[in-house]
Image: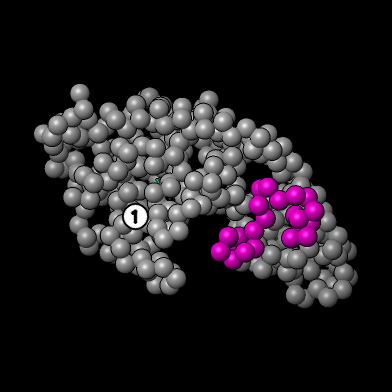
C-alpha cells in the first residue's frame, strides 16, 4: 500500500501554549515519520469570525508557524503552508457549496453552539455557516486519507465525508473519504483549573520566559484541603498534579509525598516549574533563531505552497473535467 496522506490545519491564534503542544502538535510531529503530511494555517477560517478585525491575522500566522517549527515540524518532511496562498481551496469550496444541503450545516453542533456562545460578533453570515464546507475543501482537495483532530472537530469530519460521498455520487469517484485520527489528549489545566485556553487567560505559552513560567505556576490553585504543608493531599483533584503527570518522570514519588503530607504545594510547584522550563528550553532556543530570520519562514511557506499547489491544482482540473467546465490546460 502506498504511503498514506495526513492533513491538518489550525486557525492562526498567534503564539501557542502547552495545550496546543499536547493537544495537537506533538502528535503532528510524530505523524511526520509515518505519513506524507500536510499542515497549514487556516487563515480564511479565522475570517469567518474575525471579519471585522483582520489586522493581526498575518502576524499571528507567522508566529504560529514559528512555534510549529520550534517544536519539531520539519519542512523537509512535511508540507507547511498558508491556506490563503492556495486559491484552489476556494474554488473547491465553491463547488462543494453548490451541493451541500443547508440542513446539514444548520444542524452542525459546532455551528449551533458558537451562535449561542459568541455574542460579541454577529455570526449570522453566509461564511460562518459555510465554515465546515471550507474545511471539507481543505481536506478533500488533497485527497487526504487521515485527518488528526480533537474531539470537537469530529462533526466537521463526518460532514466532510458526507459531502465527499454526495459529490462522488454526482460526478464520479474523484474525492477520497477521509478518516479522523482522534488525538488522545491529556487534560492540560490552566491556573484556575479550567482547560488551558487563550479566552480564559490562563495559558503558559511556549515562549514564556522561565521567570514568567515560575510566576504562572505559583498562581495555580491546588487541593483546597491543604492549608499547611503537612495536611494530607488529594493529587487526583489538583491541577498541578495533572501537569506533573505529563512533565515529571518522578510524578509517582511526588504523588505519594503529597498524599502523606510530606511535601508542600510550594515545593511541589517548584519541581514542576523546573521540569517545564527544561522541556521548553530547546524549543525557545529554536524560536529565537527563527525570529531572527523571517526570510527563512517565508521561504518555507513559499516552498510549501508550491508543493501543495501541485496536488490541489490537479484535483481542481479533474473536477473541472468531470463537471464539463473549462480547465486550465
Ligand atoms: N476547524 C479546525 C479547528 O478549528 C481548523 C481547520 C480548518 C482544519 N481546516 C481544517 C483542521 C482541515 C483539519 C483539517 O481546529
Side (left or right) of 218 relative to 104: right
175 vs 326, nearest the viewer: 326
Q: Position of residue 75 (x, y in %)?
A: 53, 29
- Which residues are drawn in magenta? 195-217
Looking at the rendering, in which quadrant would you find the C terminus?
top left
Tell me, yes or no, if residue 69 can be seen here.
Answer: yes
Residue 206 placement, left or right of 153: right
Query: In the rendered view, would you say 21 is above or below 192?
Result: above
Q: Position of residue 56 (x, y in %)?
A: 51, 52
Give neighbour class at mark 1: few <14, some 14-19, many 20+ (Cα, 10 Å): many
Q: Given the current orientation, which residue lies at the most extreme left position?
A: 324
Q: Is residue 153 above or below residue 114?
A: above
Which residue sits at x=75%, y=49%? 209
Write down the residue under mark 1.
131
**218 relative to 100, above or below:** below
Colouring scheme, one of rainbow, by chain, secondary structure, one colour: one colour
Q: Residue at x 64, y 58 (%)?
A: 203
Ligand 1 contact, mark 1 (Cβ < 8 Å): yes
Q: Quadrant of the N terminus?
A: top left
Residue, x 83% and y 75% (percent of image)?
Answer: 227
Amino acid at each position: 500500500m502506498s504511503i498514506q496522506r495526513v492533513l491538518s490545519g489550525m486557525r492562526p491564534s498567534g503564539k501557542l501554549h502547552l495545550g496546543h503542544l499536547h493537544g495537537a502538535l506533538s502528535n503532528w510531529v510524530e505523524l511526520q515519520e509515518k505519513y506524507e503530511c500536510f499542515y497549514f494555517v487556516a487563515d480564511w477560517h479565522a475570517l469567518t469570525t474575525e471579519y471585522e478585525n483582520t489586522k493581526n491575522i498575518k502576524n499571528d500566522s507567522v508566529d504560529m508557524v514559528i512555534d510549529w517549527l520550534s517544536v519539531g515540524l520539519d519542512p523537509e518532511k512535511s508540507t507547511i503552508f498558508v491556506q490563503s496562498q492556495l486559491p484552489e481551496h476556494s474554488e473547491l469550496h465553491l463547488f462543494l457549496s453548490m451541493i451541500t444541503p443547508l440542513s446539514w450545516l444548520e444542524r452542525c453542533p459546532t455551528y449551533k453552539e458558537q451562535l449561542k456562545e459568541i455574542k460579541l460578533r454577529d455570526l449570522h453570515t453566509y461564511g460562518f455557516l459555510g465554515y465546515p464546507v471550507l474545511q471539507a475543501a481543505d481536506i478533500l482537495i488533497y485527497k487526504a486519507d487521515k485527518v488528526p483532530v480533537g474531539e470537537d472537530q469530529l462533526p466537521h469530519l463526518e460532514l466532510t465525508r458526507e459531502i465527499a460521498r454526495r459529490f462522488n455520487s454526482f460526478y464520479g469517484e474523484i474525492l477520497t473519504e477521509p478518516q479522523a485520527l482522534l488525538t488522545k489528549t491529556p487534560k492540560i489545566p490552566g491556573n484556575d483549573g479550567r482547560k488551558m485556553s487563550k479566552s480564559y487567560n490562563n495559558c503558559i505559552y511556549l515562549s514564556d520566559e522561565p521567570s514568567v513560567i515560575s510566576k504562572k505556576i505559583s498562581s495555580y490553585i491546588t487541593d483546597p484541603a491543604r492549608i499547611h504543608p503537612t495536611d494530607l493531599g488529594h493529587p487526583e483533584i489538583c491541577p498541578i498534579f495533572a501537569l506533573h503527570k505529563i512533565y515529571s518522570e518522578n510524578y509517582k514519588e511526588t504523588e505519594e509525598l503529597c498524599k502523606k503530607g510530606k511535601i508542600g504545594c510550594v515545593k511541589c510547584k517548584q519541581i514542576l516549574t523546573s521540569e517545564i522550563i527544561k522541556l521548553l528550553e530547546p524549543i525557545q532556543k529554536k524560536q529565537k533563531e527563527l525570529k531572527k530570520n523571517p526570510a527563512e519562514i517565508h521561504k518555507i511557506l513559499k516552498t510549501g505552497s508550491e508543493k501543495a499547489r501541485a496536488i490541489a491544482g490537479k484535483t481542481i482540473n479533474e473536477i473541472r473535467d468531470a463537471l464539463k467546465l473549462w480547465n486550465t490546460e
